[in-house]
Amino acid sequence: MTVLNQTTDNTTAARTAPAPRRRKPLATRAYKVFRVVALVAVVLFLIAPLFWMLLASFKTNVDIYDTAKSFVFTPTGENYANVLQRNNYFVFIFNSFWVAFVSTALSLVLGVPAAYAMSRFTMHRSALVVLMARVIPGVSLLVPWYYVFSNLKMVGGFEVLILSHMFVALPLIVYIMMSYFDSLPLELEESAQVDGLTPIGAFRRITLPLSVSGIATAGILSFIFSWNNFMFALVLSGSKTKTLPVAIFDFVSYASIDWGGLMAAATVVTIPIMIIALFTQKYIVSGLTAGATKG
Amino acid sequence: MSVLNTSRGETARDTAPGAGRSPARTPGPRENFSAWANRHRKWLFAAPAMIFVGVLIVFPLAWTLYLSLTDSQGSVRAASQFVGLENYLTVLSDVERFWPAVGRTLSFTGVALACEVVLGMGIALLLWRPFRGEKWVRVAILLPLVATPVAVGMMWRLIFDPNIGFVNQLLGMIGIPPQPWLSGQDTALGTTIFMDIWQWTPMVVLILLAGLTSLSEEPDEAARMDGANAFQRFFFITLPLMMPTVIVAVLLRGIDALKTFDILYATKGKGGGSFHEVETLNVYAYGLSFDYNQYGLSSAVLILFFMIIIGTMWLLTMRKKAVSK
């Protein structure tokens, strides 16, 4: 009977308290040890490769080839100096940032109202059109795009890159915002309309301010996807608009690879987006899991 | 008071004509527009995004379909001839590159997905109940997810390098001879699958964890009281309840896994390596288009690829509906 009480007590606590300590019968001691070991293994598995990349980026190419110096070596900033100065990575960083920023902003302008309408009027078929964009292999769009945009003399410009990245961002934003609006109670808008706001006014003054965290989620995630996008930029960017993921290949030539430089370049691409991700963790997690639990 | 009443009436059927017009003022031109906008806000809001996506999808898809029926090559601009279904016949009878690419695409997706779901479920279960240091594990889970795939490919390329790679160093310590992970014809595909698992298992973990935390506790507690052990509770209670979430995860991850390009291109380059050992349909079609300018053939491959994707999704959605009921 005591066991019963204990469990039910804990269950109710689990719903109200933020981080409740749950049941701990004797049998779980072995499980606890197992869990610690397993979690350490998981964390190591996920972190170690990134750590290795970071280490290599501080090694000279001679040290990288010397297996005796795997962990003990004299760190050098040479690779970073090489990446940032000689290869002019500041330009590529700006390009990546600019394309990601503008495509995210424009996609939000188009996507948020669309998601709102699709959620409120349950336009599932229309939503499917937008979500189709996630299913189609990018290559099948690239040939026609390349043809049209090169005829318009737009290939190599920012506009075409931004358009192509919006194509990735928009479905993502619609998907996230739809499930966000689905979870906002309709009554708030209705009472605003009772107080004399028009439906669009209610959307603008009530719903939008309430959706700031949802919009942040969608915006951050779309920024990350655009920053990481490779295939569209590979074909559609020019020498002046090259983004970071494409610029990495400057370090790979047919004959040899400048491993130190390559790892420094890879780190330069990855670090900014990881820092953004760490500061906006909860938004990213809620964005990636949006709509997943509704079944 | 009358204002309040009309507004309330309008809210109930707010798409009806005249909704939102304030009866107190005389309707000017601006007022008319506002009323019109409010009445048509459904399409006013949705249409721009749909037109944008539609133009950027429908037109290219139609073009790809058209190209797949021509012998277009060399330059997209050069005159090409209508050849009917010839490209499809060529592609479907191509046992050298097309069918192996289909096989690789499906086995890449299948194996990666299976491992990611099993591992992801395991990790999600580990994270389910609160524990100390949870924050750090969450950070570790997030890092691979947001890392730039091309950079990740380069990173693994160094780690799996036959001569200087860390993996072979580790194996050397326990006396196993160096393996040609990415350069071997038999091992390359497996190695890229491993990379996909590293990067995307966290995504499955997050989705499944969200599903687990939204589960109601009662069935689990009831089974516990009936004396069910942890394994029984998982296989007969948690897992069946989680099936819809699992299928969502499989759908989301599956679409992207089928289309994997960045990691394969970064590790093996154009054409999926010198022996096409990691050439999936995506890499194959990309090479045909942008390296060999075989637009007709490439388009036929893409149309077939697209049909495979749609088919897979349709199957999964059917399965999801069956499970949800």
Image (tube, helix red, strand yellow):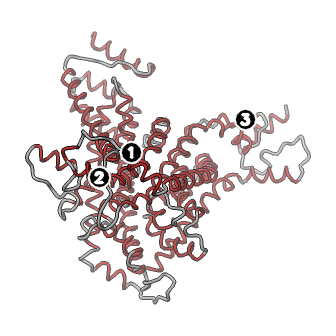
- Residue B216: x and y, percent? 39, 30
Q: How far apart are marks 1 and 2 (CA)?
A: 12 Å
Judged from the image, the secondary structure of the residue bearing numbered disc 3 is helix
Is any atom of residue B243 visible in this view? no
- Residue A57: x and y, percent? 34, 47
Task: Determine which of the numbered discs, if any, sits on residue A192 in the image.
Answer: 3
Which amino acid type is marked by label 2?
Asn
Q: Which residue is drawn at 39% across and 80% down?
A: B294
Task: Determine which of the numbered discs, if any, sits on residue A77 in the image.
Answer: 1
Determine which quarter of the picture holds residue B68: bottom left
Name the residue at the top extreme. A2
- Position of the N terminus of chain B by quadrant: top right
Is any atom of residue B144 visible in this view? yes
Q: Which residue is drawn at 64% across and 51% down?
A: A109
Query: Could you classify mark 2 by the number of other residues whose Cα lies within 10 Å: few (under 14), some (14-19), or many (20 or more)?
Result: some
Which amino acid type is marked by label 3?
Ala
- Residue A149: x and y, percent? 57, 72
Mark 1 touching mark 2, by CB under 8 A? no
Q: Is residue B261 above or below residue B30?
A: below
Q: In this view, does A262 lie to the left or right of B97?
A: right
Query: Could you classify mark 1 by the number of other residues whose Cα lies within 10 Å: few (under 14), some (14-19), or many (20 or more)?
Result: few
Q: Residue at x 48, y 73 (%)?
A: A143
Q: Is residue B32 left or right of residue B154?
A: right
Mark 2 / mark 3, whichever is N-terminal:
2
Q: In this view, does A156 lie above or below B197?
A: below
Residue indicated by mark 2: A61
State how many labels appear.
3
Q: Are marks 1 and 2 on the same chain?
A: yes
Using the image as rendered, state which of residue A17 and residue B245 is in the foreground: A17
Determine which quarter of the picture holds residue A262: bottom left
- Residue B66: x and y, percent? 48, 80
Chain hosting mark 3: A
